[in-house]
Image: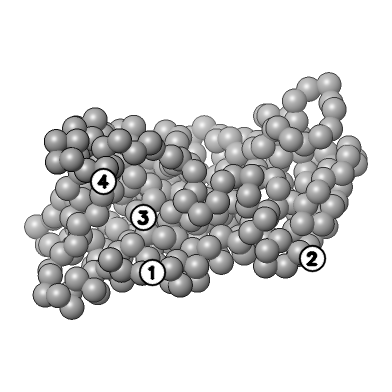
Amino acid sequence: MLDFTDLFRRAVVEPFIDEYRAGRTPNPCVACNRSVKFDPLLEWGRGLGAECVATGHHARLRFASDGRARLLRGADPDKDQSYALWPIAAGTLRHVRFPVGEIDKARVRQIASELGLESARRAESQDICFAAPGEYPALIEERDPEDPSLRPGPIEDESGVVLGRHQGIARYTIGQRKGLGISAPRPLYVLQLDLARRAVVVGPQESLFRRSLVADCVNCLAPLEPGVPYRVEAKIRYRQASAPATAILHVDGTMRVEFDEPRSAIAPGQSVVLYRGDEVLAGGAIRESLP
């Protein structure tokens, strides 16, 4: 057994806290895949003389004639995890195998049961492994009880009218409706988290919709050229279907994605992943959404 506790804290938990402090909505599974689950494991395996490592991710790989590893959605669409694998370097993917990605979850459980494995009876969880959703602010408070993201501030509408007070922007995320603590003639949703003013901006559901986004930290798994518009299916949330869009990569390492139809609650800090059919072309961290 390998102990990556310290690495996990540095590479996953601390950045997660920093993102929430900044009013963004991070995806720690992406950070874990990028920094913990693959390269350190592969390095350890190579020390034992292994050429490849296998993980239990629901994703598939195909190898092009030039040796490039093509990352594909898992065979079970309900359990597909390709969305969280976009930051894995193409060179690393050549030395990875996803044996359960070719079968559905029911069959995986059946095989585990036949082998007498405890995992066959283990309940599934969609929560982050190191904290439940309501515990995120506690992680920040543990580090710094006086952090600005925990301080009260105004809840404003889109015109700047103060509707109430909040108890810290770290307790909110884009698209949130419940727990605002204000009354209004129609449902209101979190539209923006303004750390500089410690303001939570709210508005009607239609104001959540944006047509485009800019992402950074882009990783291309397919040969894409900067400045060329590509027709893709883009996914902005793990449990959300991908949608038709046009994507353009820029030489500065950013990417702009424009959807055919506006998308709701595009949250900075989350991932946008580009697909062509089942193949993952590229991914990045959402920096901002645009009208």
Where does residue 181 sit, x and y in percent of width and height?
A: 81, 34
| 282 or 72, nearer to the observer | 72
Question: Is residue 111 positioned above or below 169 on the image?
Answer: above
Sooner in the amino-acid sequence: mark 3 or mark 4: 4
Q: Residue at x 45, y 72 (%)?
A: 6
Q: Residues within 10 Å of mark 1 (few under 14, many from 20)?
A: few
Residue under label 3, please give it. Answer: 86
Image quadrant in which you'd find residue 52: bottom left
Task: Give, as a three-letter code, the residue at label 2.
Answer: Glu
Give the spatial CA distance, label 2 vs label 1: 30 Å
Residue type highlighted by circle 1: Phe
Q: Which residue is mark 4?
A: 59
In this figure, what is the number of numbered marks? 4
Label 2 vs 4, first from the N-terminus = 4
Please name the residue that numbered disc 1 is placed on: 4
Tell me the tag on residue 222. Answer: none
Q: Which mark is residue 146?
A: 2
